[in-house]
Every structure is written in structure tokens, then in C-alpha cells.
Image: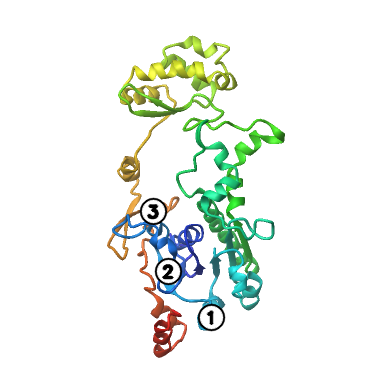
Amino acid sequence: MQPLRGVTVVSLEQAIAAPYASRHLADLGARVIKVERPGTGDFARAYDTRVRGLSSHFVWVNRNKESLTLDFKDPRGREVLRTLLAEADVFIQNLAPGAASRAGLGADELRAANPRLIVCDISGYGSPGPYESMKAYDLMVQSEAGLLSVTGSDEELAKVGISVSDIAAGMYAYSSILAALLERGRTGEGSHVDVSMLEATVEWMGFPLYYAYDGAEPPPRAGAAHATIYPYGPYTAGDGKVVMMAIQNEREWRAFCERFLARPELATDPDYAANADRNRNREALGAILRARFAELTSDAAMELLASVPVAHARVNTLAEVWRHPQLAARGRWHEVATPAGPVPSPALPGLVTGEPRMDPVPALGEHTRAILGELGLAQGDVEALLAEGVA
């Protein structure tokens, strides 16, 4: 299932947000030409060396791509890029604020030369506005979007453990580009997609924002527990292992009191009868729950929760996720080649027919000669660009 086969994406990308968007397009069959700095490439290549000497970030978001090294600040490199974009379907960039426009790669200029081109700009805060020139790493945007105000515990703020603002921006860029391709199919015209990490993260903040609407008290930081639904969070069993569980409605609460707590009278206790009551009295109710979990092993608690039934889960380590039986049963792990050898890679979520595309993670500049040759450059000119550090 590769519905984007025949679509060419040129991505002047770095780090996570743009590479994540373009990798999803590549997974759906698009040809993605990743433009990188000669010599060093995407700086995410050097974040760490945890995957057979390669960067964990880079291996994650760069399968199914071709790597073209090009110095677009050099007039010769910029001309090569313009030649590529003249026939491309999509251009993605997440350079520093204003860098693309200063290089003559702004949406208006590019679409004047190629009206069918879809230009996607990804930035931290968007333009215009007082924040348009600010650097915007993931943690900075999590902070500005209020995400840190609702994560962590009473005592300490905590960032989300993944690059959630980068991922949010990448996903909105991906879905917006798909929508733009559909629109172009109807009108024949490309468009300009403008995605900011701040706006993407604020969209995901919907519940806390509305909970604190019109000056209301915001949800408290509650660690791994839900801030406003109770009980909903982690409990330590008698063997020291943590079990996650959740009650979502009063029907589940009544069954939980009867079958798990063996205290059916709690279901109608006015202190606990509705979620608002339980949330208000979570300290007292928490003591009852903790005492009950301490009487059980984690396996016994899981079995009992399943029999109620209420939602429950193990708190897995990353090593356990690699071995997760559900992922194995659904055949989610495949193999992708890298410059350091094959590594496992999960299939794109949602694709259930056919084999997923698992083309290699490219070495820096691996496809430069081939792509420049496709553009009609003579071999001598290609070698000169390489020798002079332009490509």
C-alpha cells in the first residue's frame, strides 16, 4: 500500500519535526530526497551512537529516503536545488526562522516557478508574531505551550519523555501535506502549508486548557496519575511491581468496589459515589486502594482487574516493549538496512495490507552522484561540485 508512489518530496530538513513528516510520506511510497549539509549532514546524525554506532534519532526518522549533500548557500548549489524543485511535488523545510526566505526559497517565490508545488514550512512559533525569530527546541515549546505546567508532580516539573512538540508538528505537517495533495488533485494548484510547533502542541493541550477556561483552577500536576479522574494511575503490588489501572464511569466503579476491593458499600459512599467526589477525596480513597494492591502480587492484581473488568496495564520497560507480545502477534517489527547493518523497525501504524516500505536509512550523501546525474549534470561537473564541497 504505497498511494504516494510517483510523488517527489524534497526536504531541507534537520532534527525531528520535518524528518518525521517526510518519513511518513516516504512510508506511503513518496520519493523523499533529503538535502543535507556537505561533510556533516543533518546534525541529528551526531546526537548519539546507540544504534550500532548510529544516532537513535536519525535511524528512527530517516528510513526510505535518499541523501543529497548540497550547500544551497553557494549559487551553484542553490541552482541545483531550484532545478530539483521545479519538478518536485512537495518541498518541506524546517531551517532556522527566516533562513529559507533569505536564500530565495520562500513559498511565494518557489510557487511562482512551480505552481503545482506544495511548500511546507515548519517552525517553532510561526510567522509573523513577536516569537517568530526565537529558537524553538522541543523543551522550549513544551514550556511555552503550558505542557510543563501539567506534567510532573507537586514538587517538580517534568518534560514529556519524548520530543512531543516536534512529533506533533511533524504529524500536522504530514496530514496537511496529504490534504494539500488531495486539493491539488481537484484544482491543479499547489499550496503553502505553515505549521508551528507551538500551535501543534497547544492543540494537544485541549483538555487542560478548557479545564482552566475563564480563569478556573488548572488541573494539578499528578505524576503518573490522571489529574482529574480517580482512580486512574499507578499502584504498587505486594511484589513491588507497578500496575496501572483506570476507572472511567460509575458502572466500572461499582463493579470494581464489589469484585476487586470486596467492599461494595464504597460504591454508594457519598465521599466516593461520583468521580468528582473520588477526585476530591483521593487521599483517603488512595489509602484504601494502596492497601488492597499491597495484598496482591502484580499478576494476581492484573487477573482480578481483568475479571472486573476495568482497564489495566503493566508499566513496561523499553526492553519489554521490544519484546511486547501484542506487537509480535500483529507482525509489527520489520527489518531496515542502515549503513551499520540491519536493525528492526516498526511498520507505519494504520497500514494493514501488503508489506510496508522498508528501504534503507541512507548514509550521508549516498545518492548525491545519482541525483545530480538525473538532473543532467555532466560527470565532470558533478565531481567538481563534490571536490569543492558544494555537494
Using the image as rendered, state which of residue 203 and residue 334 is in the foreground: 203
Tag shown at residue 83 = 1
The amino acid on which the numbered mark 3 sits, given as a three-letter code, is: Ala
**Farthest residue, direction top:** 265
Q: Position of residue 307 (x, y in %)?
A: 38, 22
Q: Position of residue 236 (x, y in %)?
A: 37, 25
Q: Position of residue 170 (x, y in %)?
A: 52, 56
Estimate the spatial distance between the alpha carbons at disc 3 and disc 1, rounded to whole Å.
Answer: 33 Å
Residue 37 lies in quadrant: bottom left
Mark 2, residue position: 41
Horizontal side of residue 109 vs 152, given as left or right: right
Q: Position of residue 355 (x, y in %)?
A: 36, 58
Q: Is residue 115 visible?
A: no
The amino acid on which the numbered mark 2 sits, given as a three-letter code, is: Gly
Q: Which mark is nearer the camera, 1 or 2?
A: 2
Task: Identify which residue is drawn at 55% across, 16% down.
Answer: 272
Estimate the spatial distance between the alpha carbons at disc 2 and disc 3, rounded to whole Å.
Answer: 26 Å
Mark 3, residue position: 347
Crowding around mark 2 (Cα neighbors within 10 Å: few <14, some 14 to 19, many 20+) is many
